[in-house]
Image (cartoon, rainbow, N blue to C red):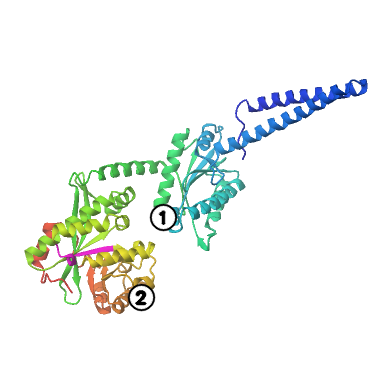
Amino acid sequence: MSLPPPAGRSYRLAIYTLLLLVIAGGAVASLLIERYASLHSMAHVFNVMALGTASFMIYHVWSRFRSEDELLHLANHDPLTGLAHRRYFEQRLQSLPPAPHTVVLGTIDRFSRVIGSFGHAFGDAMMKSMAQRIREAAEQHGGQAFRLDGANIAVLYPMDQQAPAFGAALAALQEYMRSPFSCQNHEVYSTLSLGAATFPTDGADPATLLRNADAALQTARRGGGDLLVPYSVELNTQADQRLDIESDLRHALERGELELHYQPQQSLRDGALAGFEALLRWRRRGELVSPAVFIPLAEESGLIIAIGDWVLEQACRQASEWSAHYGRALTIAVNISPRQFTHPSFLPKITDLLATTHIDPACIELEITEGVVMENTEQAITVLGQLRALGLKLSIDDFGTGYSSLAYLKRFPIHKLKIDQSFVRQLAPGTGDAAIVQAVIGLGRNLGISVIAEGVENAGQRALLHLWGCDEIQGYHYGRPMPPREAQRYLRSSDSMVLAA
């Protein structure tokens, strides 16, 4: 879809062209008259020069118009992809006719990971290719594509979301994106997260329309990507609630609203208490907020760095207190977030914390998800080695839920594998879950790594895990998460407070 000329440009073009045609016409007429009138040859030369000058002026004016067209194109288009950019997109929304139009906002899923792995030059090449695909898919169904910024795009369709053609248009857009992108001997698969809002039903002005489309897009991203989410009023309500929660979360530390609860872990070898896992809780306005709600918000906003530091400090102090009181070392496992693990300050802060609290490093076990260590394996191996050198224990959390490479696993200096509760919840002999659990236990045994299963809720699950040689369990069957004082009473009443070696 071409851009309309600016106001007055067509008028100027007509005037300049008419003027030049008059000059050229006069020169030609003069030549003809003087030729047949047999006038002096100097007049003939003069008119030839006049014709040449007119031709040059015509060429110069048209060249200027071409330059203006190029400048106009650059002023309204993204220089990398050639798509119209955000400013022109907003201008188009300002001038929409009184007929249904649908704005689709999209973002290329995991694009930052591509840049992190292959560099910005690779990312630019991929973005150009993706933009071409998006343009082709949009124009096939009457849409116009725009690049807003980074990996964010928009498509404007002259139709309502309820139109049958809209479904076909979005299916084509997503299908174009699923084809792999190849560059520099690398093949990358990508998808689009999409949010849609219709003018004028979902917003009669550009600001409202874009805000609602963006609310739908963010929901699609949180849903894991490769999704189209149409706008609904509930999305704005959810977005407002998320903003309120995030705003309160920023003050949770200073208000003393964060708590650590401790869930006991049992050794299946002798039934003794093996240690605790520290679990973060937030008491907002007197009520506990689900970690499933606030942990992702803390991760997205970057608050997880400060919160994670606080959790580590509290866990270290609690382990030190319990060890001093009972005269025995008790392990406390602490979850480390992906953002926290990859932050440059992570290792120095742990080193300072161990020095400040004077705790035995073996009392702290850091739980790191397999997705984090597999994303940048060489860097992860280096960091894990440095943590191990400090004397800390290390475990891979939620093992089996992501992508694992046995070739790398044997290089990780870890002490423990934690079987995710999704494999334990419906555990029964002869099932797929049973096969996976037994395989992980066997893998740990062969690698000399202990294995703990979480989510154990009944005696039957415990009996199977004990039969198969699992080292430890964690779950409601043995003990629920509890505040520090209650955990201390649990310690006092336990048959053994000796950490399983």
User: Depth check: 348 or 288 in front?
Assistant: 348
Check whether the beta carbons of the residues at disc 2 and disc 1 lie within 8 A of each other.
no
Given the image, on which type of amino acid does mark 2 rest?
Ala
Within the magenta stretch, is there residue 48?
A: no
Give the image location of residue 383, x and y in percent: 30, 63
Name the disc covering residue 440, or none: none
Q: Counting other residues with Cα less than 10 Å from the Cα at mark 1, is it few (<14), some (14-19), or many (20 or more)?
A: few
Q: Give the residue pinned by disc 2.
A: 435
Camera-nearest residue between 54 and 419:
54
- Name the image quarter holding the N terminus: top right
Where residue 496 appears, as percent x and y from the top left, is 11, 71
Q: Residue 336, position in %: x, y?
A: 27, 59
Q: Secondary structure at mark 2?
A: helix
SS of the residue at dot 1? loop
Above or below, comparing residue 155 to residue 171 in the picture: above
**Marks 2 and 1, how far apart at CA:** 28 Å
User: 77 left or right of 349?
Assistant: right
Q: Residue 65 sits in which quadrant?
A: top right
**Is residue 361 rendered magenta in the image?**
yes
Q: Which residues are magenta?
A: 359-367
Badge 2 or badge 1: first in the primary sequence: 1
The residue drawn where x is 34% and y is 50% is: 300
Residue at image mark 1: 224
The amino acid pointed to by label 1 is Gly
Camera-side mark, 2 or 1? 1
Q: Residue at x 56, y 52 (%)?
A: 172
Q: Is residue 482 visible?
A: no
